[in-house]
Image (cartoon, grey):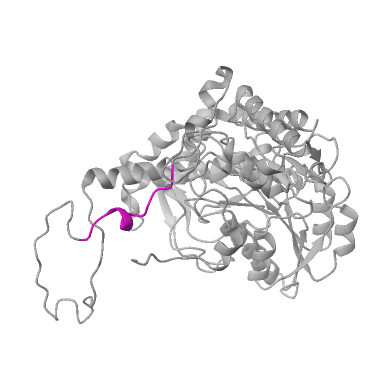
Amino acid sequence: MNMNSTGRPTRADKTSSSKNAEIKSAALLPDEPLLFEIGGYEHSGVDLFEVEINDEFLGGFERKTSLDLPGLSEPECLRHYVRLSRLNMSIDAGIYPLGSCTMKHNPRLNEKIARLAGFADIHPLQPVSSVQGALEMIDELALWLMELTNTSAVSMSPKAGAHGELCGMMAIKAALEAKGQGHRSIVLVPDSAHGTNPATAAFLGYKVRSIPANKNGVVDVEAVIAALDDDVAAIMLTNPNTCGLFEPDVIKIADAVHDAGGYFYCDGANFNAIMGLVCPGDLGIDAMHINLHKTFSTPHGGGGPGAGPVVLSKALAPFAPVPFVKKSGSDLSLIEHVNDSDSFGRLTAFHGQIGMFTRSLAFMLSHGKDGITQVAYDAVLNANYVRVRLQKVFSLAFGDQACMHEVLFDDSFLKGTGVSTLDFAKAMIDEGFHPMTMYFPLVVSGAMLIEPTESESKKTLDYFCDKMLELANDAIAGNVDRFKQAPKYAPLARLDETLAARQPKLKWTKS
């Protein structure tokens, strides 16, 4: 067996059939030391002049101890970061089946457009007269978003989905207060919702009232009706929901909430499954955020950059925040202040994320309406293909019914094997896959949520399903060691994640 410096098996121990040679499951590289551990402290890759600084120059804030930065040559530094980059799992390296996250391919055309000097080099404090093209682009994107959702207004400011939720719920709160109904203090949230939904409601001072799902994995409309009263401000509902299912009673739910005097906030995280097919405005929503970093292929992850514009119904449009773009003849202006307006005010310092806007509009224009519709069809088709292939061994959380953009399995097929969902996910790493979303939604035991998106070919899906079935059959056959010892080929192998979370080491200390 070939061994690397860490004593772990190397890539040479992994094999694959020639049929799938271009998507081999390959081990990651050995662990890469920190720069501090590589570089020396007696030399540097560049020559720096000695600088004399008197006490007045830094106002008494000069360092009292040595900076202790490691010195490396340019090749050493470059190779360090290249090696680190090769440890990354990304959508450019292989299928990224995270359910609820929509990790889809980012077309390079979009990246090229985002790097055009007229967009990439502008500054948010430039005079409006010098950024007319950027404002026109934002205005065009806003029109597309309203067209796709059949809504009356859109706020482009929010920087992510949760930020968009805050925006929409602040508009709802402002609308209720304008009607003299600020006493409404309850927000209905399904048990299967994204965690940001109840967090957003609580952040704004609302109390959360949970709504259960029925046996089919969708919101129980009768439970919604029973929970409605004069204190309910809104419902926050995801559609398609986090179980990967379309809510069949969504119009009945919207009507019931409106009849009770509340508003309907829709979590648009899963818009990728229905864009071009269903207009949320036709379903009765009052506000919905759209994750541009999920639905329209802009980069996703790492806490940003993101964008979560919020579309608003006619009832909520007057309460949209500033700033917003306004067209007057051929000129565009950015309205920063509105006097005598119902607007709830300013949400954030500047107007959204320009790099995300350019990428999203490039995606829309290159696909066209028919192409956007095809994206939704393909996303749903791919998820159902995975569902049908895996359900021969895996256990579906809500029975044999068609899903939308993602398929949800529970852990009942692993009962009695000694293998948990976490163990299964760790073994996937050894096969070259990023694990699917685990233990979410919380309403399903040992949840495994898989979203292939529209980006993946049938060949890739078949390879993924073949490996998933191989792992499942191995677990059922009793090969527990394969799972408890996994991952063997990752740089640091199996970690104690609980200890790492509770006692993180956030600072390197020289030994």
Is residue 343 in view?
no
Question: Quarter of the image containing the C terminus?
Answer: bottom left
Residue 300 is one of the magenta-drawn residues: no
Q: Main secondary structure of the magenta part?
A: loop
Query: Seen in the image, is 111 located left or right of residue 345?
Result: left
Residue 352 position within the rendered picture, expressed as x and y whole percent measured from the top left = 47, 53
Instruction: State the image quarter where residue 465 is shown.
Output: top right
Q: Residue at x 75, y 55 (%)?
A: 442
Q: Residue at x 70, y 39 (%)?
A: 406
Residue 241 position within the rendered picture, expressed as x and y whole percent measured from the top left = 74, 47
Residue 470 position within the rendered picture, expressed as x and y whole percent measured from the top left = 70, 31
Is residue 305 in view?
yes
**Along the line of sight, which residue is nearer the eye, 159 or 105?**
105
Magenta range: 30-41
Q: Residue at x 32, y 56 (%)?
A: 37
Question: In the current view of this chain or complex, which residue is farthest to the top?
Answer: 19
Residue 34 is one of the magenta-drawn residues: yes
Instruction: State the image quarter where residue 453 is shown.
Output: top right
